[in-house]
Each structure stands twice: as C-alpha cells, then as structure tokens.
Amino acid sequence: MDASITIKKLEFRRRMGTKMTYKKQLIMLPGPTNVPERVMNAMTKPIINHRGPEFRELYDSLLKKLRYAFQTKNDVFTLTSSGTGGVECAISNILSPGDKVLVPVNGVFSQRLKEKIETFGGSPIEIPVKWGAAATPDQIADAAEGQDVKAIAVVYNETSTGVTARVLNEIGKIAEEHDALYIVDAISILGGDELPVDKWGIDICIAGSQKCLACPPGLALISISGHAWEVIRQTRSKAYYFNLLKIQEFHERKETPFTPALTLWYALDEALTMLEEEGLEKRIKRHEECARAFYDAVREFGLEPFADEHWLSNTVIAVKNPPGITDKEIRDLMREKHGVVIAGGMGQLKGTMFRIGSMGIITGREVAATVQALRSSLEELGYFK
Amino acid sequence: MDASITIKKLEFRRRMGTKMTYKKQLIMLPGPTNVPERVMNAMTKPIINHRGPEFRELYDSLLKKLRYAFQTKNDVFTLTSSGTGGVECAISNILSPGDKVLVPVNGVFSQRLKEKIETFGGSPIEIPVKWGAAATPDQIADAAEGQDVKAIAVVYNETSTGVTARVLNEIGKIAEEHDALYIVDAISILGGDELPVDKWGIDICIAGSQKCLACPPGLALISISGHAWEVIRQTRSKAYYFNLLKIQEFHERKETPFTPALTLWYALDEALTMLEEEGLEKRIKRHEECARAFYDAVREFGLEPFADEHWLSNTVIAVKNPPGITDKEIRDLMREKHGVVIAGGMGQLKGTMFRIGSMGIITGREVAATVQALRSSLEELGYFK
C-alpha cells in the first residue's frame, strides 16, 4: 500500500486544539515530543504556594485526570524526576534484600530495570529475550515456576528497540497466580496504546510526562495498588527522596513531601485536559494509525523495522540502517535540511538504526513531514539509485 | 528607625528587568518565589533534543553561569529534583557504611540532613544547637576533636528558623584540618548572601532553583570539588537516579544520564542571565537591604524575630507569633485581603511563627506591599489596640 495514501487518510484533527508552535524543528524523538502551545503556555501561570489551597485544587485535578489516563482507581502520584526516577521509586520501595524479581530483558530500558533491581538489593531472575522481540507469557510462566517470586517487572514498550509487549494482560494473570507484585514500566507508551491498569491487574505502573501525554519532561507518574501498599508498608524502604510512605503521608493533605516542579504540574494538568477532550480511545487509535503510516512508508522505501512484526510499537518506530548508510548521515540531513529531529540507536544498538518517536499530539501532518524528510534525505544519500 | 523610611530608601531597580507579572498574589514564601516574566516566558521556548547540539550549547551556558553564581571553578550539575534530592545526591554518593559525619542540628532542614546521613549508611555526630542559633566554629572544632570525621555537613541557611550560619569560612578551615569533606546545604541562600564556594573550601554545595535565583522549582544544583570526586570514586555508591559517577560520565559529552526537565533548564538559564546582568554582589546587597527593612518593620510593630540577632537570615524572616494571635489568622488575612502569601512554621515550630521569604527579585516594592499587608492584618486582629 502506498504510504502517502495512508498518510492522506489520517485526519488532521484541528479540533483537538493541537495548534503547534511550528518553530524551526519538528521533534520526532521517542520523548520529549512536540508540546502543544496551550500546554507550553500553561507553564507561565503565576506561581502559587505549594502548601496552600490553590495547590490542593491542582493536586485533586491532576489525580482525577491521571486516574483516567491510567484507567485505575488507585492513587497516582506525580514525582519531580525523569521516568528513570519513577522506576527507581517503584523498585526501591518494595524490595527487601534477596527478593526475587522476574524481569524479561529485551533492550536498554529493561536492562536498566534489571540493574535497579540489583542496586536496591533484589535478586533479578532475568529472562533473556532477543532484542526486537518481547517475552511470551509462556516464557514468563516457565521462569516463575517453582520460584518464590516477589514481583514480575516488565517494560511494556522497549523504547530502544521499538517493541511493545502486547501480552500484559496474560502476564498479569501469572503474577496473580504467584501472588507476585506486577510492575509495569509504561514510560514511553501510556496514552499511546491500550493500558487498562486495573483490568490487567497492574500493581505499580510508571509513566513519563514527556511521551504520549505531550507534556514537557521532568515528571514521572506512578500508580500504586492496595497490594503494592501492603508490600511497601512491610518493606519500610530506606528511600528518601523517592519514599512512597512519605509521599502517601503528604498525599492525605494533598501535598508533596518536597517542593514539586510547580510549572510542570500546570503543564501536565493542561496536557491531561487535552487527553480528556480527545478521549483516551481516540488518542490510542490516533497513535496506531500514525504508526501504521510510518511502517508502511518504511517498507515502501525498502527499509526494515528493527522489531519483529508481531511486536511493532505504535509509539517508537525503530528502523535498521540501510546498507552503506549510517543513521547519523540520515539524522543530520533530516535535522539540518528539513528541521525534523529523530533519534539514533541506544547502547549496543548505537550506529545500527534510527528511531522515530510517534507520540503525543502526532497527526498525519507530522507523519507526512517526517516521511518526506526521510525520503528526501535517503535520496540525497544515494539510497534510491 | 522608622521602617517606612528604610523601605523608601530602597531603589526599585527597574533596570534589572524585574518586571513582575503582578497577578493576584505576591508570593513571599521561603521558596518558590515570584518569578520574573522573562524567566517564565523562557520556559515556552521550543522543545529540543536533549541528545542534540542545541542542548550541548545550553549545557555549556548553564555550567558557565552556575560557576559564576557558586564562585567556583568546580563542575556544577543540574538535577531534576527538589533541593532535598540534591542533598540526597551529595550524601548518598560519598558515604560508606559507618562513616562519621559531623552535623549541627538547629532546625527542620538540618534534621533532614542528619536523617539522610543515617539513611545512606553514615553515622552522624550531631551537634545539637538551640533552634534560633547556629553552631559556632568552637562547637564544631570541639566535636571534631579526636574523631575520624569523613565529612562536616552544614545547613547554611536554616529555612525553618531564619538562621544563617555566617561562619562557613571558619568551619571550612576545621574541615581542612581534619581532611574531612565539607558539604554545605545552601538551598535557600545561594545568590542571597555571601557564598564563595572555592574561597571557603566547600567541597559539595547544593542550591535550589526556586529561591534566590528566582526560577521556578524543580531543579537542584550541586557543585563537586576535586577532593569530593576522589571520595565519590572510592565510594562507588549504589545511588541510581542520583549517581554522580554516571552524571560525570554524561557530563563529558554535555548531556545528562536521564531526560532533563528541559523547560526548567531554559528558565534557569534566563534566571542566571539576570543574575549576571545584576551582578552577584549587588544581588546579595539587595537581599541584605530588603531583609533589614523587614526586620526594622517587625521591630517597629513590637514583634520579635525567632532567630537570635547574631544569626538573622537575609532571605527568610522568621517572626514569633504575637501573644493571642495565631500565624494562621495573620496569613489568611494577608492572603485573602491583600493577596500576599507568606508561610507558617514547620515541624515542631508549626503554630508558633510566620515566615516571610525575601528572596529572588525582591525589591522595596515587594517589601512595602508585604509590610503594609502585615500591618493592616495585625490591625484588624486587634494587635495594635
């Protein structure tokens, strides 16, 4: 199918209020993303007292909207940190020395997850998975068999490989059978793909502000179930800045234990309002459609996605370098000539691929501009000869 | 001396570019503070790639300006966290189990500092000090005597009591004699009082974005000396999000290990430009003058500062509640009738005092408005009868 047709079929959805500040660059990174003007402007609201009544209103508003985004009745907390800080928060609050945690490793971020389990005293049981695929429920059930597993921790969307583990529901059932906590790193996917936290039995779910929610970076979001709270209370972690018991204590009075990044809270509140206005279902569908257009274009160009067909991500399009052309050449041309910014590979994948973030307020317009810049850069590099 | 005269003597310094967004509220908290419009607007600059060339320029710019603010040749790092995260970063990267750390405790924040030393495996040697005073160099020298002290950690400005330990230079010499690391929590004071980091031999100095630098909250700043790096390398801390070795590794390529709060970096860069334009010396003098006007007014009203005369802070004006009137009554009236927001007491001092933050772009105008609101609120509460 001709990619340009797919692209044209995508609505531009102006009604969503996604009026972009089209400055020099179109940011097509796997986070941060382009941020809508109204979200950027929200940051300039006057400073308020983070121990005063206005903040408590903001706290309530954010909590209500985050519950919608996470599809959960659990409390969802906003941390001043990157997504990595959010994952550290999850791991460091539930582990006692030697606790076994099952963790499939299929990329840079699941490697980091495993590192964190080790760092905070846990004993990771790694399920090694081919980079480009995700662990199947069978692999996870086998690894859990006969083990006293404290938790199963999964990266839902491996940002480094463009792989989405679309088996979270099944893994949740395995976690339940083993009475294990179920921890999901959903940093680069919440809002861009299905993720009904309660329905899938996820105890701790972590997301980032700067991905599919199209807010600037600097906030991590974390939902905590009743089961998780039991474990957290037993653990009495030595975490300080990321201590969930302290966060919970201040939650009672709708405050944070330490000064929050107030202006980013304003932005997140506005970004979540936009999510409500659009509707979660539509936003997910939009991500799906844009990703499909990207994959169609990539294949039309004779390029190959890094991830196996079965696991292709709707938020990160990872593409193998064409023979004889480096991603650096492609990325430099796209940025310098077309003002379109995409990413390269990470860790051991550096120099082997380019990655397009298709997240947040992505529409056919951004897809078309990116595909056009890619085509033209490949052309200039002699790829189509 | 009549306070109103002191206030009138203060220049308004419009040339500084402190054009405020005078919205409903004048924020006179001990952080966050009022943020100048140009700093707020800086946050709305377009999103860039935090692994791209524009970010490396921003990184350089911030580093250069932070060195000026800290008066240091050391590297200064920008963390996405509150000030507390910055202190956690300092403590968690230098301590091995059982390491002795000397720490004077004279308020809520030095108590927190002591807690962090315990949390991260150290053995704090507490120097208990009357709340309202600071430890003298003699007290510190006595406590260090004959002890194998790894570090001396001091809160320069106790935000909870309005006390500034203006003996940092002398303490630095004691640290040097004992070959101990010298750690200074300067969160609520950097830019508002003397703090020549290198001259005073400070190994690790921590500041916050939302205090005297008049930037929104969400960033902690931390300077690290050569001596500190030696200890950090030996320690090989288990910190993850706050791991300084990892931060140093990415520093080489002018990046951060994890996604930075980009829009806050824009704001901080602009706030530091304003500091350069004004000049550090003038900014400190301005804080001094505004504080003097506040203390004069407080005494004219027959109220009493919480801190001993000798240690009065130039950035936090802590005032004991007048007999029969609660700080809540005063604060509520000031906020609701006059749009001036001040703080109450913290921890064990809750209900005993109010605190005025006199930080950042503070001028005679803000002092006058605050004093006027205080006078009128006290009047309404029957204080002057």
Image (spheres, coloured by chain):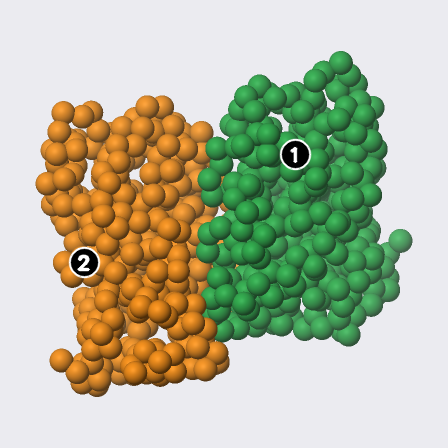
Chain colours: A green, B orange
Q: As displayed, is residue B235 above or below residue B245?
A: above
Question: Along the horizontal axis of the image, is B325 left or right of A338?
Answer: left
Q: For residue B331, what is the image quadrant?
A: bottom left
Q: Residue furthest right?
A: A1
Q: Residue at x 60, y 38 (%)?
A: A90
Q: Which mark is residue B308?
A: 2
Residue kind at label 2, given as amino acid type: Asp
The location of residue B273, given as percent across then percent down, is: 33, 67
Q: Disc 2: which chain?
A: B
Q: Nearer the viewer, residue B289 or A208?
A: B289
Q: Which mark is residue A230?
A: 1
The location of residue B77, given as percent across then percent down, is: 36, 48
Question: Along the horizontal axis of the image, is B56 left or right of A234?
Answer: left
Q: Nearer the viewer, residue A301 or A33?
A: A33
Q: Residue at x 30, y 69 (%)?
A: B322
Residue kind at label 1, given as amino acid type: Glu
